[in-house]
Structure formats: C-alpha cells, structure tokens
Amino acid sequence: MDVMTKVEIDKLEQKMVSRDGPKRPRDAATLILLDRHGNDIVVLMGRRHAGHAFMPGKFVFPGGRTDPADSRIPVASPLNEQVEAKLMAGIGRTGPARARAIALSAIRETYEEAGLLIGRKGAFATKKSEWQGFVEHGVVPSLEPLRFIARAITPPNRVRRFDTRFFSAWRNDVAVELPQGGPTNELEELVWLPLARARQADIPDITRRVLDELEGRLAEDPLLRPGGAVPFYRLARKSFVREIL
C-alpha cells in the first residue's frame, strides 16, 4: 500500500468543499477508448463544459453515474470472468448485478457523450430511453471487450463524490460511430490524443495518474488481456492510499 501526502490528495481531485458534510460516493464508470496510430496509442478524450460544477473545462474520458437498471439490459456477451471478479473485489458490496450495471454504464455513457456504440451488429430491443440509440442502429451492447483499469473514490468534502471504475476498450470494438457525436452536450469537443500528449492536457490529476497506470500496463501487455493488476485509490485513515485489486 502506497501512502500519499495531503498535498497529493488535493491534487488528485479538484478541491470543492461541500457545506452539507461528507456525501456517500455514487457508483460511476468511465471508458478509456484506445486506438493505434502507427507506433502510437491514442486515447479519446473530451472537454467538459466550463459551466459544470464538477471538473469544469477539464479533458476527461466519456463517463458518468451508474443507473442500477442498466444491469437488466441484454448483452451480446457478458463480462470476462476475471474482469467481473476484479470489479467485485475491494470495499463495498459489489455483486454480479451491480458489477454488470457499472460496466454497462460505461458503454451507455460513451454512446451518449461520444456517439460511439460498443457491441455487435444485430437486433436489439429495450424500452429504456437511454438505450434507444442501440435499438435504432441495430447494435447489441457487448461487455466482453471491457478491461478494468483502475478504481478511485473521490475524497470526502467534495461537492460531488463518485466511486469510479475506469475501463478500457479498443476502437475496433465500436460497432457504429455517429458522425455528429452523442445525443448529450456533456462534452464540448472530442479529440484523439497520443498517451504522452493526453497526460499534458488540462486533465484532473487522478486522470493523469490513471493514464500513467494504463501506460505501464500496456508496456507489460500491449493486448490488454484480462486479469491485470487494478490500482484502487481511496482515502483511508486520513491518508490517500493506492491498493491493488
């Protein structure tokens, strides 16, 4: 377990103190979509609107809060068993249904914010309004491509707190790319950046740390096979710690 200083804690998340006291973190998921350009690996990032209360103006990966109802969305293929096991490890009660909902929320948010539908072409039906893009474009969401990269819980006394799971997938796992982007306006612009340039962008420090972790994992396993070590960042006894799931 690596212990970090308070200064490093404050750098990991934008310091936004809540007047209502500590809030319980909400489940959230984000997707690091990767592609290969020659010898470079590039990552998809988008800029959050300056008016957002949480991380305004920062470049981030597509992502957002988990909807528990996402666990009931049919899929073309389930989570890899090793990925599911890692998702259920660590603090908190994370059963298979919750793990499934968290993973599916990463896919849904990537569609909503970036217009990228991860899955397989085929007939798909659901009454959930957030998933109608998959119905219209004939894409069945698929969880098998997802790799669990990192987990981080926002420290207390922030305006918003999230228990975020960072996933990755490859661009060739995308079945449909909408030229106009996603149906929401969460992100002002979308860009593909080499990993080195992405780390130099205006990004939250936790995002930079996750990119560092990802680059190290890619160096050991360029294919990002399931089962790799997953760093977990959280506050424990007034110190921010890094554990391995």
Image (tube, rainbow, N blue to C red):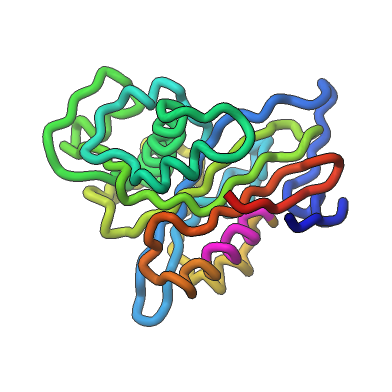
User: Which is more toward the observer, 88 or 110?
Assistant: 88
Report whether 224 appears left or right of 4.
left
Question: The N terminus lies in which quarter of the figure?
Answer: bottom right
User: Which is more toward the observer, 195 or 231?
Assistant: 231
Picture layout, residue 164 above or below residue 2: above
Q: Residue at x 81, y 29 (%)?
A: 18
Q: Residue at x 52, y 70 (%)?
A: 195
Picture layout, residue 2 above or below residue 18: below
In the picture as drawn, the residue positioned furthest to the bottom comes out as: 39
Q: Residue at x 61, y 64 (%)?
A: 201
| Number of numbered discs on residues | 0
User: Which is more toward the observer, 230 or 19?
Assistant: 230
Image x and y of residue 38, in percent: 34, 80
Image x and y of residue 110, in percent: 40, 43
In the picture as drawn, the residue positioned furthest to the left comes out as: 123
Report whether 23 appears left or right of 208.
right
Tell me which secondary structure the magenta stretch mostly adopts: helix
Within the magenta stretch, is there residue 17? no
Image x and y of residue 72, in percent: 33, 22
Picture layout, residue 188 above or below residue 128: below
Image x and y of residue 223, in percent: 36, 67
> Residue 129 appears in which quarter of the rendering?
top left
Report whether 30 appears left or right of 177.
right
Q: Residue at x 43, y 68 (%)?
A: 42
Within the magenta stretch, is there residue 209? yes
User: Which is more toward the observer, 204 or 78?
Assistant: 78
For the record, the magenta segment spans: 206-214
